[in-house]
Image: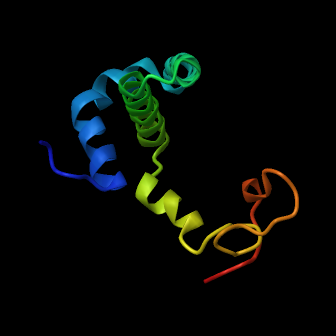
Amino acid sequence: MPREMTIGEFQQLIERTYYDKDSSRGLAPSFMWFIEEVGELAQALRSGDRNELADEFSDVLAWLATMASISGIDLEDAAQKYACGCPKCGEMPCTCPEPGGHQSESSASC
């Protein structure tokens, strides 16, 4: 069984495997591939098949890592936005009153 990876290790693995091809393709076409994979994930969510779900989640994650790398974004650093809980209210779990409250940033800090 493969060892567990951090987000950063996963991004580096995807870079070593696909970066040259993906970066020459460009961000916009890579985004289109990402959206296609999100659509396949939506279908897997409807079916509820766990193996299909795992496969599609991994594809979405791989394309997300690709786009981050092409954009010069380190996903490990980007994930720190949520290190202290909800970026809007600063709580864990989120106590924002509105649905999707975790989507906005605030000045909350750890």
Across and down, in percent, residue 19 comes to: 31, 31
- The residue shown at (76%, 72%) is 89
Outermost residue on the left side: it is: 1
Specify the farthest residue to the bottom.
Answer: 110
- In the figure, 87 relative to 66: above or below? below
Quarter the N terminus occupies: top left
Quarter assignment of residue 90:
bottom right
What percent of the width, then of the height, locates residue 2? 14, 43
* Vertical side of 28 occupied by 75: above or below: below
Measured as percent of width and height from the top left, residue 75 is found at 45, 52
Q: Quadrant of the C terminus?
A: bottom right
In this orientation, which residue lies closer to the viewer: 44 or 17?
44
Q: Is residue 66 shown left or right of residue 9?
A: right
Quadrant location of residue 49?
Answer: top left
| 60 horizontally vs 28: left or right | left
Residue 104, horizontal then vertical, whole percent: 77, 58
